[in-house]
Image (spheres, rainbow, N blue to C red):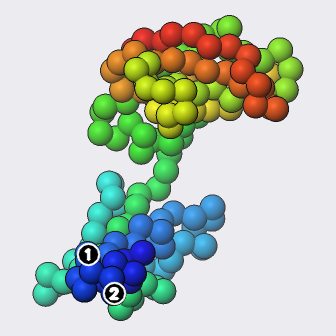
Amino acid sequence: MAARLAKTLEIDPLTIDQTEQMPASRPERASSTWRFAQAKGWLTAPRILRRKDGSAYVGGSWRGRVDLQVFHPEVKLVDGRPDWLTRDGQRKPVEIPAEADPKSGRVLVQAFAATEADDAIPVDQVVLVAGEPAPVLLLPDGEFRLVVQDEKGGKVLEMPLER
């Protein structure tokens, strides 16, 4: 995208990679630079690493192709959800009403801002599986519309939800 913008608009846009310097499913699958930064304790939050001369470090397959590279910390689960969803303190856990629990199979639970249209992007969503503990929704303050869909996409329940 940046290459197209640069060519079309004759500009040099700031380009940032956020895909390569991340934790992996197993430590040995993460980049050696990410593992080094993690071992040093530098990844308590997303970071851009700088060299001694002040320039940004960019490694791996993005070296020479982007201006900055974000290193992301390990993801920890809190109430079954990734901790980065709550890092800024804006989102808080909200229990899903028992009415949404599936009797069998699984359902998709989506929280939409109450004032947005039916085709809006959900603020948060989770899958509930019958017989398993329900995760929480992580929502900012506000009024929401909770929509529950079955595995075929049919609407099972819609109700207001407030945080």
Considering depth in this image, is 35 or 54 the residue closer to the camera? 54
Q: Residue at x 77, y 18 (%)?
A: 102
- Relative to residue 62, is residue 9 drawn left or right? left
Query: Which quadrant would the N terminus be assigned to in this image?
Result: bottom left
Residue 98 shows in this picture = yes
- Relative to residue 9, is residue 64 drawn left or right? right
Residue 21 image point, x, y percent: 44, 71
Is residue 90 depicted above or below 74 in this figure? above
Residue 123 image point, x, y percent: 46, 33
Q: Residue at x 85, y 26 (%)?
A: 105
Considering depth in this image, is 158 or 109 the residue closer to the camera? 158
Q: Secondary structure at mark 2?
A: helix
Look at label 1 and name its amino acid: Leu
Q: How many marks?
A: 2
Residue 100 is drawn in which quadrant? Answer: top right
Look at label 2 and name its amino acid: Lys
Q: Residue at x 43, y 26 (%)?
A: 116
Residue 126 image point, x, y percent: 62, 32
Residue 16 is drawn in which quadrant? Answer: bottom left
Residue 7, numbered label: 2
Disc 1 target residue: 14
Residue 12 shows in this picture = no
Query: Which quadrant would the C terminus be assigned to in this image?
Result: top left
- Relative to residue 80, is residue 5 drawn left or right? left
Considering depth in this image, is 5 or 126 the residue closer to the camera? 5
